[in-house]
Amino acid sequence: MNEPLFGRLAIVGPGLIGGSIALAARRTNVVGEIAITTRRQATLDAARARGLGDTYTTDPAEAARGADCVILCVPVGACGAVTETIAPVLKPGAIVSDVGSVKASVIAQVKPSLPGGVHFVPAHPVAGTEESGPDAGFAELFEGRWCILTPEDGTDPEAVALMNEFWQCLGSNVEIMDAAHHDLVLAITSHVPHLIAYNIVGTADDLEAVTRSEVLKFSAGGFRDFTRIAASDPTMWRDVFLNNREAVLEMLGRFSEDLTALQRAIRWGDGDALYTLFERTRAIRRGVIEAGQETAAADFGRRPRDEADE
Amino acid sequence: MNEPLFGRLAIVGPGLIGGSIALAARRTNVVGEIAITTRRQATLDAARARGLGDTYTTDPAEAARGADCVILCVPVGACGAVTETIAPVLKPGAIVSDVGSVKASVIAQVKPSLPGGVHFVPAHPVAGTEESGPDAGFAELFEGRWCILTPEDGTDPEAVALMNEFWQCLGSNVEIMDAAHHDLVLAITSHVPHLIAYNIVGTADDLEAVTRSEVLKFSAGGFRDFTRIAASDPTMWRDVFLNNREAVLEMLGRFSEDLTALQRAIRWGDGDALYTLFERTRAIRRGVIEAGQETAAADFGRRPRDEADE
């Protein structure tokens, strides 16, 4: 890469995603200067200690001033307030983007305060881990993962093309879709899975007849897989559910309906109904692995001998 | 280990668990001879090809004849039938054990047909992967995991002590508890987690508005973690639900009740309720890791650079 796509990139919120963007952008020389901003001084110090950017400030407007691209990497509920703060200093032709797991709500929050001549290209890199904060990011996070862009009709095609190229440079595959469809797809592939993981961990912790010590000791029977997701950032996920309410409630309704049917099959001893579902779901696992979105190693490759090899 | 605990060990069902027991027992010299039996010739041939035992037969009685210990490694619904077949040839003083994820039902199936003088020590190694069959086993599967013994009152203490030592030799920690309590603990730590994983994978596959291709591509947002568990052996899991009905329905009832409360919090925009739960569940994740039942590596350590290192 000889010519950077953006002379100056501003990252608002150097957490897992924002920090990983900074590291990946630096490694691939896809940007010139990287300005890092976050409200909390301690977070900013941690970002500086990891060398995530070139300049650091607790003032988002200072970071956004003169930027060719500003990426909001904050909880989706905070996107509107940040945009209001940076709007007055955005230069004509600048691109504003984000990384939120919900798109329609972010568009509704961001669009009203953006000045004319500034392009908005909403984005969602479908990647992450259960960790959060400036120390959690790594440059390879987006490799082989999908990034979804949801520009509204009439968005400057050149701005969309630039963001498309940016994410491809970071290692992602890019797909463009309508914001409402994105929110529906993610409700089932991400939001409801998180909700039921949080829920079962809470249910297990509330039992009187089974101690927490027992839950932890015998978690290798399946429970532990759910705890990973249930360790994700609480603020980020609270905002996801508050801002994608309709789609989450729709998918949750279907999940509960299907679960009730399974419950009935168990109550009535309908082994065939259970077997039919359990057989069908195996094929989906193979599909996820074939789609390059999962390791094929048994048990996520976490058998003791692999741990010993580390 | 100089003196084997059992001169002859018979394994009925050389799948993931049975095969791993054979490999671990051989590696630690905890047994003399290992007899392998399974009904299907193809499975037996695969077990022989992997060298899981010393003798191979499709006749369970032939394998059990003269055995000091017989371990039933078949779906829990099949334990009664197998016991009837081997009961006539069991030698006095022999120990019969199993590896089922449900204990009260297995006891009810096995006990009636066992001859006097044969000891029954039900066992459940809480370990496994999503794979199954003779090729799936490995000697380290039980290392650091828990094995639960659920002998009834009055069981010969020496037989219990022998099985305790056997599982410790295979690398497990051993806990002894009441069968009914086991079934309740496992309902929440294993059975209901499997059920909701199977369920959400089914729900996602049934949507009209979201294609299977979209579900697979964007599964890195959380869904893929559930597909691992939903790829587990269908027959084994059908039998678990049919044989632990009461406990599963009880835990499922609590899960659904809690999920309904979360659903209501989303509908009414109660962010505090969501945040409080999401914060609390993080602590459980830390507990699982501290209990040695989970890798601390982010994202199960499956970030691209680790995959590249393999």
Image (cartoon, coloured by chain):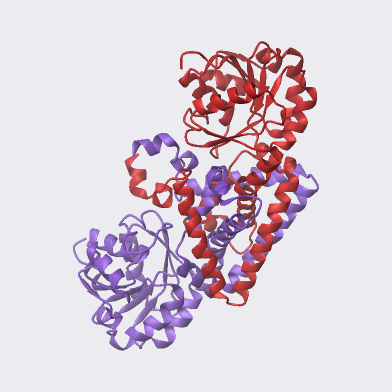
Chain colours: A purple, B red
Horizontal and vertical percent for residue B234?
Answer: 65, 40
In this rendering, position of residue B173 left or right of residue B148:
left
Which residue does the image show at 73% across and 12% down from the upper left?
B89
In this rendering, position of residue A90 left or right of residue B256:
left
Horizontal and vertical percent for residue B109?
Answer: 77, 30
In this rendering, position of residue B286 left or right of residue B245:
left
User: Closest to the observer: A155 or A179?
Assistant: A179
Horizontal and vertical percent for residue B111?
Answer: 76, 27
User: Closest to the observer: A36 or A182?
Assistant: A36
Horizontal and vertical percent for residue A261?
Answer: 74, 55
- Picture quadrant of residue A127: bottom left
- Picture quadrant of residue B47: top right
Which residue does the image show at 44% across and 48% down from the upper left?
B290
Q: Residue furthest top?
A: B66
Asked if residue A11 is positioned above or below residue A114 in the image, the reply reads above
Asked if residue A70 is positioned above or below residue A210 in the image, the reply reads below
